Image: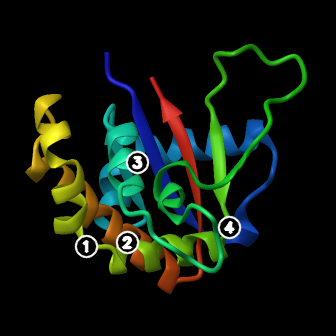
C-alpha cells in the first residue's frame, strides 16, 4: 500500500479554510500531479516523509523564527480541522503560511545535506534507507520550497492513502 504526503503551493488568498473545500482542492491537484509537478507547484513523498523529517532533525539548527525549523518542510503548518461529524477517513490537511514557507526554504538552502548524512547515515543505512534517495528528496524539497517562497505562496499538505 502506498501512502503519500502531497505538497501544493498556492496563493494564500485562494485558500478557503474549510476542510471540505480544501480536500476537494487537493484531490484535484493530486489528479493533475504530472502537470503541477512540471510547473513546480506540487511535490510528494511516498511513505518516507518521517525519515526525511528525522534527517532534518539531525541538524540541531538554530533559528530566530521557530524553535524547530527542521519540522517545517514536512510537519510544519496549521492542521485544518475536519468538518463536524466527519469520520476519520477524511484526508488529514495542513496549511503552512507564506512566512513558514520562507523559513523552510531558508532552512533547506542553508543546511548541509552532507553534514546531516554524516550524523544519521549509518543509522539510516542500517534501516535500508539510501543516501541517494534522501539526497533526491532534499533537492526536490529545496527546489519546491524555493519556488513557493519566491512566489510568496503558502503550502497545503495532504496525506493520501
* Disc 1 + disc 2, Cβ < 8 Å: no
The quarter holding residue 112 reads: bottom left
Return the disc, 3 or 4, that comes first in the chain's sequence: 3
- Badge 2 is on which residue? 108
Question: How far is the residue under mark 1 from the one under mark 2?
Answer: 8 Å
Q: Residue furthest right?
A: 84
Return the disc, 4 or 2, that comes first in the chain's sequence: 4
Question: How far is the residue under mark 1 from the one under mark 4?
Answer: 25 Å
- Badge 3 is on which residue? 53
Return the disc, 1 or 4, that comes first in the chain's sequence: 4
Question: How far is the residue under mark 3 from the one under mark 1?
Answer: 14 Å
93 or 64, which is in the foreground? 64
The residue sitting at 27% across, 61% down in the picture is 138
Quadrant containing the C terminus in the rendered view? top left
Return the disc, 3 or 2, that comes first in the chain's sequence: 3
| Label 4: few (<14), some (14–19) or many (≥20) C-alpha neighbours in 10 Å | some
Amino acid at each position: 500500500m502506498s501512502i503519500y504526503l502531497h505538497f501544493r503551493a498556492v496563493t494564500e488568498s485562494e485558500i478557503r479554510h474549510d476542510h471540505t473545500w480544501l480536500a476537494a482542492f487537493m484531490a484535484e491537484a493530486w489528479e493533475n500531479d504530472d502537470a503541477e509537478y512540471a510547473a513546480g507547484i506540487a511535490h510528494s513523498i511516498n511513505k518516507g516523509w518521517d525519515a526525511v523529517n528525522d534527517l532534518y532533525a539531525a541538524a540541531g539548527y538554530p533559528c530566530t523564527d521557530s524553535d524547530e525549523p527542521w519540522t517545517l518542510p514536512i510537519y510544519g503548518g496549521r492542521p485544518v480541522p475536519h468538518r463536524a461529524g466527519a469520520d476519520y477517513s477524511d484526508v488529514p490537511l495542513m496549511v503552512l503560511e507564506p512566512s513558514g514557507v520562507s523559513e523552510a526554504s531558508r532552512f533547506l538552502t542553508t543546511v548541509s545535506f552532507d553534514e546531516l548524512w554524516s550524523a544519521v547515515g549509518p543509522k539510516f543505512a542500517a534501516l535500508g534507507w539510501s543516501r541517494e534517495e534522501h539526497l533526491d528528496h532534499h533537492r526536490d524539497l529545496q527546489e519546491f520550497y524555493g519556488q513557493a517562497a519566491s512566489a510568496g505562496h503558502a503550502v497545503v499538505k495532504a496525506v493520501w492513502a
